[in-house]
Structure formats: C-alpha cells, structure tokens
Image: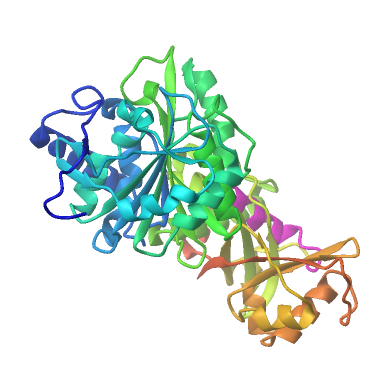
C-alpha cells in the first residue's frame, strides 16, 4: 500500500461496553489482568504456538483470557503476525469472512492488517470478503487490546470470522497460515451459555476433557460458541502431535456474575511436543504426588484419592503419562497411559501405584525398596499417525532418542518410550525390539503395520526422604 493511499478502518464496536473505551483506562485494566494472571501461573515457560481464549466482557472473562496472554511475554519480540479466528454471532454465512479494511482500531490505537496474506487467501474455497460479518462482531475485537499490550504495535493481524464450516476446512486454512515462530494463532471461544452454575460446570467439564483429548467433532455450538474454529485447530494439531494445556477454566458465576445463568470460559496453550514443558514447580509437584501415592498404597493398601482442586490448572489438563520406578539403576516397574483420558495429576498418581504394584514383570514394591528408589515421569504428546513407504523408509525417518513409537500389526500392539533408545540405540534394534514387545517376530513385516509417533517430556528425582520421617500413610496430597 502506498504511504499516501487512504487507510480504511474498522472502528471498535464494543469499546465502552465489553472493555473500557478510554485508552489509558483500558491499558491499566489489561495490565492489571496480565499481572494477576502471571502471579497465578508458574513460569517462565516458552511461548505457545497457539492459544484458545474467551471473548466476553472483561469483567467476566478477562481474567481467564489473561491466563492465556501472559504466556506470550517470552515471544513478544519475535511474533510478527497474529492469525485470529472467532465465531460469527450476528451474521450467518458459510465459510470464512475477511474484512476489506486495512486497519482495526481500538482505544489503544490502530492494528494493521496483513493485507498481503489476506489477499493471497482470495482463491481459497470458502474464503470471502464480508465486512458485515466483522462490523459488530466482538469475538475478535476483545482480543486486540491484550495483543497490543503484550506484543506492542509491530505485529500485523489476519482477522477471520468463521461461519458454517467443517473441522477439515478450518484445519486446511490453518495449515496455509500456520507459519513459523513469527506467527501466533488464536482461537476465540466461550463455552456453555446460560445454564445454572452446577449444570455449566458439568457441561464445561465434559467439553474441557474433549478439547484436551483433541476429540475433534465431539462437541458443537451448544458446548462452545467457537466450536467450529476450535474443532478445526484440534484437527490440525492432532496431525502434528501437539500438547494442549489447560491454563484456566471458570464461568461468569465464578468471576463477576450471578450463578443462576452463567457463561463458561476456558484458556489453553497449544504447543509443539518438542518445546512443550511444565514449569519446574509443577514437575516437582508431580514427582511428589507420585511418591506420596506409592507411600499411601504401602501404608494403607489402597490407592489414594486425588483432590484435583488442590492442583494448578496445568496439572488438571487431560494428558497421558508413564511412571517409571528404578532402583540402583535398574528398572523396578513402569506403567502408563498411551491415550489421554484423565487429568494429568490423577494419571500420574494412578500410574505410580500401578508401576509399583501391578507391573506383571515384578513383585509388589516393598518399603525398603521404595526408600532408595528413583521416580521418572514421562508426559506424552498426542500420538500422531506416522506415514512411511516401507520398513526401510520407517527406519530411515526415526529420530533416535526423541521418538516414542506405537506399533500395531496382526491384531497385536506395543509401545516403546523414547528412553528405550538408551538400550537400543539403532533404528533397527529399536524397531525389532518393539515388534518383540508387541508379541511379533523380530523380522515381522506386513501391509497392515501401523505406526504412531509421540514424544515425551521426562523428569526424575529420588523418593523424598521426608516421606519416611512419619507414617507415609499420613502424607497428604501436595497442593
């Protein structure tokens, strides 16, 4: 665009209603929300590739949205483009609506649109220019002040209102816009609408589980008004082996409104498995949880009950884990989950007890063994289908030390964690060992072989000595 060309602009539609209309007051409010959110979350951590965040008025959902945006501070200087997708609330249409303007204005100043990228989408099926879809739409607008305060004025925006679409259509569009570290993707959605507090918590709890399990298409607009873009990004990241981490889940009855008619809100970080990690404090908490779960099983001969409310949101995320027990450098038990199906804290506690007492390769763990044991927790990314031409191609494309594999063939199935590379350091040894573990011959190969690949975030520590200073059964779950 020529410097002398007139600039077309979308004026804010909900300033003064959903958020303060005065620039100075808006900056103060957003900064306070971000500061409060940073105090509630452990860090620092790498910035995520994508966020899911709510779009209601700031007094209702601002604190939840801030839980997502505070994660961006480490990347504030490197993000140059924001792709923002939100649902259509006021205008019905099919496909994806782009605006024709050059700038979106907020009380904090102008946000420049990435016209070059938007114009390049003109030939994509379903993408239309539709200013009416943007004119009064709040699902994109309410995110802009957060972006302006965190990223400054240097980023450009690709704003997309999502109409009637399929997950595949959204995923395909996102694949074209995904980019690298310079591009941040944001999906705007609220959760359930206008139920009583108890009903909303139940419905939203089910939706949260489906989002974190990346169960594409398992929920619709009744569970999340932005279900179409949410399902689309889940479709996309499930192909990449991403981790979806819960940052905050509340409703308007928890934040500022009455409890008889609430709206639900959630915030999530979507991260490549290679860079996703837990805060060090959360790692320690999981290791302590695993050790205490085993201690209670030793003392009381039962599994402990986990109170999820005592754990931070990140550890309530539905995720899969393995717990490994080693003693004097030798394996003493290893049990885990390949598919995410319960909150991470609960999964770790369950698998810790199972590794100590239900691994069929070992006798039940004893107190003397437990005293000098070391625990390792591995948090799994979502297993992604692994395409290959033949066995040689599969071996050539494996990443020693990084890849965990699930192999399925002839009705049998097995898995190796990435740590198995320590003992089987070549692709051939690793793959042949996995076949044997699955109950297949070492030289087995067939057309029905299927492979899924995943990575792990692993961390370990000795069993805390403090567990033995008193009756281990009296140890309470960490909070």
Which residue occupies the foreground of this view, 149 or 182? Answer: 182
Judge whether 141 appears above or below 455 on screen.
above
Can you give x and y, in whole percent of width and height, for residue 410 in the image? 91, 65
Give the position of the C terminus as an image quadrant: top left
Determine whether, in the image, residue 354 is placed left or right of residue 213. right
Colouring method of the image: rainbow
Can you give x and y, in whole percent of width and height, for residue 398 in the image? 65, 78
Look at the image and say whether residue 209 sits in the magenta stretch. Answer: no
Which residue occupies the foreground of this view, 143 or 296? Answer: 143
Which residue occupies the foreground of this view, 178 or 77? Answer: 178
Which residue occupies the foreground of this view, 196 or 289? Answer: 196
Give the position of the N terminus as an image quadrant: bottom left
Q: Residue at x 63, y 50 (%)?
A: 340
Can you give x and y, in whole percent of width and height, for residue 421 in the image? 65, 81
Q: Which residues are the magenta region?
A: 343-362
Taking the view exactly as shown, the residue that stands out farthest to the left is 24
Taking the view exactly as shown, the residue that stands out farthest to the top is 260
Judge whether 73 appears above or below 442 on screen.
above
Look at the image and say whether residue 348 sits in the magenta stretch. Answer: yes
Q: Residue at x 44, y 34 (%)?
A: 189
Does the rendering let one see residue 233?
yes
Q: Residue at x 47, y 20 (%)?
A: 193
Does the rendering let one see residue 318?
no
When asked about the image quadrant of residue 370, the answer is bottom right
Can you give x and y, in whole percent of width and height, for residue 140 in the image? 34, 36
Determine whether, in the image, residue 148 is placed left or right of residue 376. left
Judge whether 392 appears above or below 305 on screen.
below
Judge whether 30 appears above or below 420 on screen.
above
Specify the principal SS of the magenta part.
helix
């Amino acid at each position: 665009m020529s410097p002398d060309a007139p600039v077309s602009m979308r004026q804010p539609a909900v300033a003064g209603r959903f958020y303060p209309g005065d620039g100075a007051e808006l900056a103060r409010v957003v900064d306070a929300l971000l500061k409060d959110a940073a105090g509630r979350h452990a860090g620092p951590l790498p910035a995520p590739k994508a966020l899911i965040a709510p779009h209601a008025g700031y007094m209702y959902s601002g604190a939840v949205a801030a839980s997502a945006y505070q994660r961006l501070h480490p990347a504030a200087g490197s993000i140059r483009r924001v792709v923002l997708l939100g649902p259509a609330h006021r205008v019905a249409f099919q496909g994806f609506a782009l605006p024709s303007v050059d700038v979106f204005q907020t009380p904090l100043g102008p946000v420049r649109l990435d016209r070059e990228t938007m114009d390049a989408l003109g030939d994509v099926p379903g993408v239309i220019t539709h200013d009416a879809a943007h004119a009064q739409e709040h699902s994109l607008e309410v995110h802009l002040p957060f972006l302006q305060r965190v990223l400054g004025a240097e980023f450009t925006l690709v704003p997309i209102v999502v109409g009637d679409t399929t997950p595949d259509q959204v995923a395909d569009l996102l694949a074209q816009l995904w980019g690298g570290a310079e591009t941040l993707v944001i999906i705007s959605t609220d959760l359930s609408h206008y139920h009583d507090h108890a009903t909303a918590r139940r419905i939203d709890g089910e939706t949260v589980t489906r989002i974190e399990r990346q169960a594409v298409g398992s929920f619709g607009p009744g569970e999340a008004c932005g279900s179409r873009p949410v399902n689309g990004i889940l479709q996309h990241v499930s192909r990449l082996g991403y981790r979806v981490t819960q940052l905050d889940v509340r409703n308007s009855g928890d934040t500022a409104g009455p409890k008889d008619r609430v709206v639900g809100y959630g915030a999530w970080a979507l991260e490549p498995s290679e860079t996703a990690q837990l805060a060090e404090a959360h790692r320690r908490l999981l290791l302590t949880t695993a050790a205490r779960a085993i201690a209670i099983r030793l003392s009381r001969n039962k599994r402990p009950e986990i109170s999820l409310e005592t754990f931070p949101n990140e550890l309530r995320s539905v995720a899969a884990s393995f717990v490994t027990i080693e003693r004097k450098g030798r394996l003493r038990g290893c049990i885990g989950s390949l598919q995410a199906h319960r909150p991470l804290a609960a999964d770790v506690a369950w698998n810790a007890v199972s590794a100590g007492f239900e691994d069929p390769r070992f006798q039940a763990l004893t107190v003397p063994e437990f005293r000098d044991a070391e625990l390792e927790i591995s948090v799994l990314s979502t297993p992604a289908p692994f395409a290959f031409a033949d066995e040689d191609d599969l071996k050539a494309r494996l990443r020693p030390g990084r890849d965990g594999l699930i192999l399925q063939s002839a009705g049998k199935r097995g898995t190796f964690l990435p740590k198995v590379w320590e003992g089987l350091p070549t692709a051939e040894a690793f793959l042949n060992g996995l076949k044997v573990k699955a109950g297949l011959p070492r030289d087995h190969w067939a057309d029905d072989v299927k492979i899924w690949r995943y990575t792990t975030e692993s961390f370990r520590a000795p069993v805390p000595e403090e567990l033995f200073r008193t009756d281990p059964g009296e140890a309470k779950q960490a909070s």
